Image (tube, coloured by chain):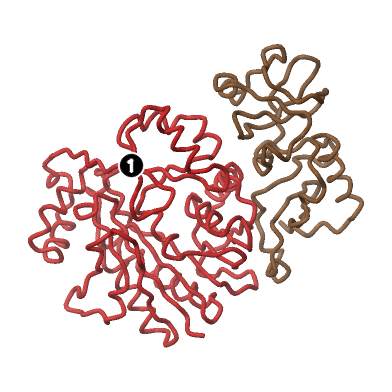
Chain colours: A brown, B red
Amino acid sequence: MIMRELRDLNKIKEIRKYFLERFGIFEHFFANYLFLEHFEKVFLLYKSKDFEKVNKSKLFGTPFMLLADFYKKIPANLALTFFKRNQIQKNWIEVDFVQAQEFMKGKNLDLKNIKKKSSVLSNGCVIVFFKDFIVGSGIMEKTEIKLNSGKE
Amino acid sequence: MVIRVSPNAQGLIAKSFLKKFEPILGKESKTFFESLTWFLPKTIRVNTLKASEQSIVRFLQNSNSKFEKIEFLDHAFFVSSNFEVISKSLEHELGLIQIMSASAMIPVIALDPKVNETVLDLTAAPGNKTIMLAQFMGNQGLLIANESDEVRLKRMRIHLLKNGVTNCLLTHQDGIQFDVGLKFDKILLDAPCSSDGEINKTINQLKDWSQEKVIKFQELQKQLMVHAFDLLKPGGELVYSTCTFSPEENEDIVQFLLDSKKDAHTVSIKLKGLKGTLPLEQYNGKRYSFEVRNCLRIWPYKHNLEGFFVGKIKKSE
């Protein structure tokens, strides 16, 4: 498995734009990170001086995956734990303890039972918080939010 | 905060194990054998990549658990009641707390990696120590976690993701041939071992204990130790650890490295408030060199913690 640094600036721009437009995450947030690519999957890694020296053919995969599928533009669920609450401005909801547990088990959420949500909330990927922590992401369709089952 | 049972451990332990450790520990051996069946306190650690200690203390209070800060470890707590509530909690599921033994945290404390260093965890699965390394590094610098077992590696990847590690690359190589074209500032070698230090979890394992198994691990550990040392930059540091009591897998391995590499020297490990951790001075008619005394041993009967051995080695500049 060969993983290489993503050098296609258009692709990087597209990723940053997606996170800015969908969640309000500013582009400068990504300044300290390298984008790595393997097939259509894009990974993030903290920039370090020694990364250039690593024999990339020996890598297995990096823990942080930015997008499960580049073309579907659905962020991988676990990867979202990377972000902090104050970095996400749009398309988020906050659930209580019971809702969080049920959601993680795969039960859909009904929007009318959600007490806290961002003022901008539209169909598509939404980030689900419990207190200050990201539980994962869901796909909102009208009033229902189902767990994003995109493979990590 | 020690909860003990007083079973007759003797019937559960292989005779060869008793015969081996009686002369090593002398008068203390009886207490040692009994201690192998104690229920040791459960421990958790705050995952500082994702949560503050304050928020986890609030969670512990709300879960009505009895807990106590561990004096010699930052961000870690003994939990003596309602542990199941914690292990099944959303906070654990979300990676805000790690469940790991206090002894297993010591190798990372000893290595003490810093922000922006290049660090290798040579035998990394299941990944709890890797997460701790990332915490010490502030999720910066470069951390490489290697694991030779592909199934364990895949599980570890999810574990690291869940716990918010973002400075880590994974490799799938045999540890004794590991090579990614890099030399490292710090290396953790938590070596595969006969694991009898964790025996409080599964006392039945001691029925099947054998010296042959110990010797088999020793051969692998020697190779891993020498190779890990060769992967250090000049001035770099290596921590070797096991969760076994056998000197063949502990003091012998450190002595073997000191004898093999003239630029290898041990470094003392300081843990505030933890006493009685000196390693063995001799075994099987062989006296270890003075440098081996810098290593550290954790015994359940002395420390109420799982058995562990930790040695820190520095490569000369």
Residue B26 in the image: above or below residue A135: below
Q: Position of residue B31 (x, y in %)?
A: 12, 52
Residue B134 in the image: above or below residue B67: below
- Side of B31 where B110 appears, left or right: right
Q: Residue furthest bottom?
A: B262
Dot 1 falls on which chain? Answer: B
In the picture, the quarter occupied by the N terminus of chain A is bottom right
Give the residue drawn at x 70%, y 25%.
A93
- Name the element at disc 1: strand
Give the residue drawn at x 56%, y 35%.
B94
Q: Position of residue B80 (x, y in %)?
A: 30, 36
Snapshot quadrant of residue A117: top right
Give the residue drawn at x 83%, y 34%.
A22
The amino acid type, in three-letter code, at marker 1 is Glu
Q: Residue furthest left?
A: B27
Residue closest to the eye, B268 or A34: B268
Q: Residue furthest top?
A: A112
Q: Position of residue B217 (x, y in %)?
A: 36, 64
Snapshot quadrant of residue A32: bottom right
Residue wearing tag 1: B68
